[in-house]
Amino acid sequence: MSFDTAISGIKAASTNLGIIGNNIANAGTTGFKSSRGEFADLFATSKLGTGSNAIGKGVQVKSVNQSFTQGNITFTDNVLDMAISGTGFFVLSDDGAQVYSRAGNFQVDREGYVGNSSGHRLMVFNTNTDGDTSGGISELKIDTSQIQPNATGNVEFTANLDSREVLPAVAWPGAGFDAFALPPTAPDADMFNASTAATIYDSLGNAHTLSLYFSRTATGNEWEIHTLIDGVSQSGPDVLQFTDTGLIDSASLPFELNISGWTPLDSTGAANGAATQDFIIDLSHLTQYGDFFSVSDIQQDGYATGQLTGVEVGDTGIVFARFSNGKSRALGQVALADFSNASGLQPIGNNVWSETFASGQPILGAPGAGGLGLVQSGALEESNVEITQELVNMIVAQRNFQANAKVIQTQDAVNQTVINLR
């Protein structure tokens, strides 16, 4: 009887329409991957095989496979929206179990974790503050606490001292200066030829002013350097000798001033509670040419505390937090997963898949490494459903349904003819 054959065809066509309908329904779903039905014919067989004149018994749904082709990428205003350009899946934590997704519409929850609207948290490789991976993966958390300040350890000046300068009119006093004395004392312009200043930081992140004063001596190509911090003289003076080419003798390099045991003060001149501090002032790049005094560069490695002002995600997946003091630190590197058979993944809804025996174990890696795609921040991957193709597929499935229904109608007519025989 061909009823069973036609019914299997109707079921297959209905299944195909269901798959097509699901694709069309998710045409606007971020990261959705379209599916297609794969069908196979049926034959009545035994252990000895199938007869040479056997008639098939219809069709069966062999599998429903997903297509993981790249969807179009659209741009958004949310820096935590991420799109994978190329191969790979975001690794998400579902209460500790790993699941995988191409949908990168992430946001921060009330605990500071980055995840999707279904509560799946984004997994990242652990990194140090410079962005170098340190092994292991964990859930990405945006820490909104202030960044810890860093006390200055090194200061570097690049400047030119004017070789045409002569001895200052007034000698630098041996007792130095103290801005907190009664009355306060400060250098007079007749005591030095040039000066410069830089901001340095103590262990609590308080800013202080480091001042250097340069005075020509009676010895040719020789200068004295007087160091003050917040208007208080430090030990010195230090003597700097140039060669007749205007450079510091290589035997004296590096030329460094060592500030030892400095006690940071507050605005009243009292100790402010910060740790006693040692640091180095590197003057190796000073020159003495016949040109006006000029400072071309000042570098120092300290900084104050800072508030979180934003987050950035690079194309290699490094997530950086930016702070109000101009510093940034890495929070992790987005982990991507690849599978030897992505079509074997099990869709579990909410735009995520789970690992199966057919998919193989996930191969984790950083974006851009090992054939994995790059991460694009402020963008989302659209569904890869092609509406035009789906509509054509729908017409074909509809015709298949109608044709199988016609077989049933024809078989019924034949049966009725047989019954009516006398």
Image (cartoon, rainbow, N blue to C red):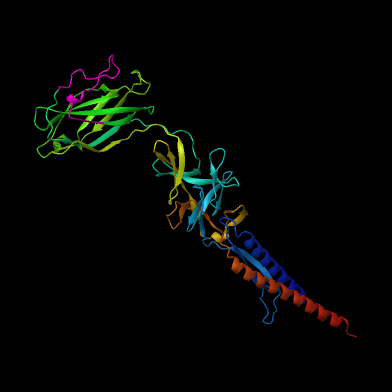
Using the rendered view, name the quadrant where residue 39 is placed. bottom right
Judged left or right of residue 1, residue 355 is left
Against 88, residue 233 (above or below) is above
Q: Residue at x 17, y 25 (%)?
A: 190
Q: Is the magenta stretch mostly helix, strand or loop?
A: loop
Judged left or right of residue 418, residue 50 is left
Q: Residue at x 38, y 42 (%)?
A: 130
Against 403, residue 165 (above or below) is above
Q: Position of residue 317 (x, y in %)?
A: 45, 49
Q: Is residue 104 visible?
A: yes
Against 192, residue 400 (above or below) is below
Q: Using the image as rendered, state which of residue 420 and residue 69 is in the foreground.
A: 69
Judged left or right of residue 242, residue 323 is right
Using the rendered view, name the quadrant where residue 96 is placed. top right
- What segment is highlighted magenta in the picture? 170-196
Q: Which residue is drawn at 52% across and 62% down?
A: 69
- Is residue 19 shown in magenta? no
Using the rendered view, name the quadrant where residue 262 is placed. top left
